[in-house]
Image (tube, grey):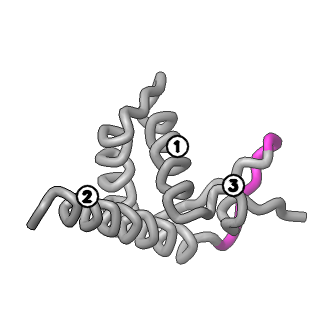
Amino acid sequence: MGAAERYESAALLGVAVAEETRRLLRRHLRPVEVGGDGTVAVSVPYPDAAVVEAVLDVAAECFDVRGSSVEEMRQGALDKLLQLTDLDTESQLNRQVG
């Protein structure tokens, strides 16, 4: 496998992981809690929460996301993952409710 094929495979894997993370979050989207700033909170129960946390931790390291807390780093990683799937503005995870 040449370098170009490895990069293409890595890109496809990255998008697949982003899509699976989005699917897990959407699965637990209801009921929606919206913060005063429009932030959508999604409560993800175990065992899906463990998967989402692991993916976001790896993504934060991969994308070199920094933050003052683990939650801030995970949010930054989630933002990057949603951008990979072109859902940063279109996703129900970011929609306005009400």
Which is closer to the viewer, label 2 or label 1?
Answer: 2
Which residue in the protein does label 3 denote?
Answer: 40
| Mark 2 Cα shell of 10 Å, populated few (<14), some (14-19), many (≥20) | few
Query: On residue 75, which mark appears?
Result: 1
Residue 46 in sight from this viewpoint: no
Query: On residue 7, which mark appears?
Result: 2
Amino acid type assigned to the residue bearing label 3 in the image: Val
Q: Is residue 38 above or below residue 93?
A: above
Residue shown at 47%/55% (left/top)? 81
Q: Secondary structure at mark 1?
A: helix
- 3 or 1: tag closer to the N-terminus: 3
Which is closer to the viewer, label 3 or label 1?
Answer: 1
Distance between the alpha carbons at the discs numbered 3 and 1? 11 Å
Residue shown at 82%/42% (left/top)? 36
Residue shown at 84%/63% (left/top)? 97
Where does the image place residue 8, in percent across and percent down from the top left?
29, 64
Where does the image place residue 65, in percent across and percent down from the top left?
42, 33
Amino acid type assigned to the residue bearing label 2 in the image: Tyr
- 2 or 3: tag closer to the N-terminus: 2
The extreme left residue here reads 1
Where does the image place residue 71, in percent across and percent down from the top left?
48, 38
- 2 or 1: tag closer to the N-terminus: 2
Residue shown at 62%/63% (left/top)? 87
Q: Is residue 54 left or right of residue 76?
A: left
Which is closer to the viewer, label 2 or label 3?
Answer: 2
Q: Nearer the viewer, residue 83 or 68?
A: 83
Q: Which region is colored magenta?
A: 30-37
Q: Nearer the viewer, residue 84 or 59?
A: 84
Q: Is residue 55 magenta?
A: no
Distance between the alpha carbons at the discs numbered 2 and 1? 26 Å
Quarter of the figure with the N terminus:
bottom left
Distance between the alpha carbons at the discs numbered 2 and 3? 33 Å
